Amino acid sequence: MSKQSVCIIGAGAAGLCALRHFACDSLHFEPVVCYEQADCLGGTWNYVEQTELVTESFVHSSMYRDLKTNLPMQIMEFPDFPATRNTAGESYLHHSQVLQYLHDYADHFALRPFISFSHQLLKVARNQTDNVWEVTVNQQLPKPISFTRHFDILLLCPGRYSRPKWPADLIETLSNFTGSVVHSHSYRSREAYAGQRVAVIGGGPSGLDISLE
């Protein structure tokens, strides 16, 4: 059987895990390529202070400064790479520790050479004639250039926490509110709200955690 080419979109936790298993089997899968629009791996676990959309390819995550996981790391870790080696048995970790874990995972399995950073996905299409996926990406560095490659296998691992969701009925009435409004996606730290009355809408994990802060 001929080798199959593999394209993975996203170098977050899911993308790294998929990359680790395809990259280790060069007998059946080659080449294996991972495109990541950011300039670093980690996906949603990359914390940045800036929340403004400065370029089309820049999408900040929902991480806020003091966030800790709401799931024990013991059930978040990959089975073949225990996190306990660097976390002293802690269960609920600061987001920076999870990001470091993903970096350690990538280094342990030598995944970085397979990742093309600063490559933004533009389009995917199925070529029925050749039975392959046509993947078009925009390479940002060293200079912007778009190109298309063909792959036998395509895995989409871009995550689902990069865009805030607003309830439709809330959007219609927000214009009546005279105070400042911020989505939890853009919340970073509590100091900016000192001395103010704060209403948190939503009782999910983010709403409860931010309310406690």
Image (cartoon, rainbow, N blue to C red):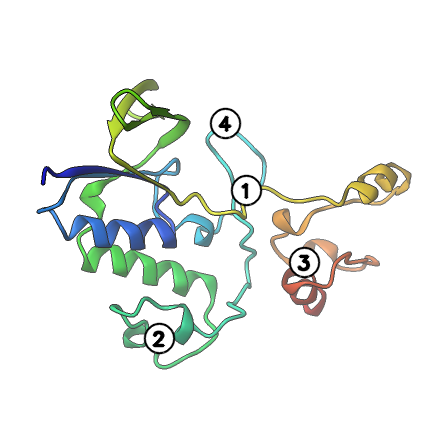
Tell me the CA gap for discs 4 and 1.
15 Å
- For the N terminus, give its image quadrant: top left
Residue of label 3: 191
User: Looking at the image, is mark 4 or mark 3 nearer the viewer?
Assistant: 4
Residue of label 4: 56
Q: Are marks 4 and 3 in contact (CB under 8 Å)?
A: no
Q: Is residue 52 visible?
A: yes
The amino acid on which the numbered mark 4 sits, given as a three-letter code, is: Glu
The amino acid on which the numbered mark 2 sits, given as a three-letter code, is: Thr
Tell me the CA gap for discs 3 and 2.
28 Å
User: Looking at the image, is mark 1 or mark 3 nearer the viewer?
Assistant: 1
Quarter of image, res 194:
bottom right
Q: At which x and y percent is residue 178?
A: 88, 41
**Residue 50, numbered label:** 1
- Say whether disc 1 or disc 3 marks the residue closer to the N-terminus: 1
Q: At which x and y percent is residue 107?
A: 21, 56
- Say whether disc 4 or disc 3 marks the residue closer to the N-terminus: 4
- Say whether disc 3 or disc 2 marks the residue closer to the N-terminus: 2
> For the residue labelled by badge 3, is the local secondary structure a helix, a strand or a loop?
helix
Residue of label 2: 87
Q: At which x and y percent is residue 63?
A: 53, 54
Pick whichever, 141 or 154, lies toward us: 154
Relative to residue 60, is residue 76 depicted above or below? Answer: below
Quarter of image, res 74:
bottom left
The local crowd at label 1, few if under 14, some if 14 to 19, many if 20 or more residues have their Cα within 10 Å, is: few
Relative to residue 123, is residue 41 depicted above or below? Answer: below
The local crowd at label 3, few if under 14, some if 14 to 19, many if 20 or more residues have their Cα within 10 Å, is: few
Return the residue found at the far right.
176
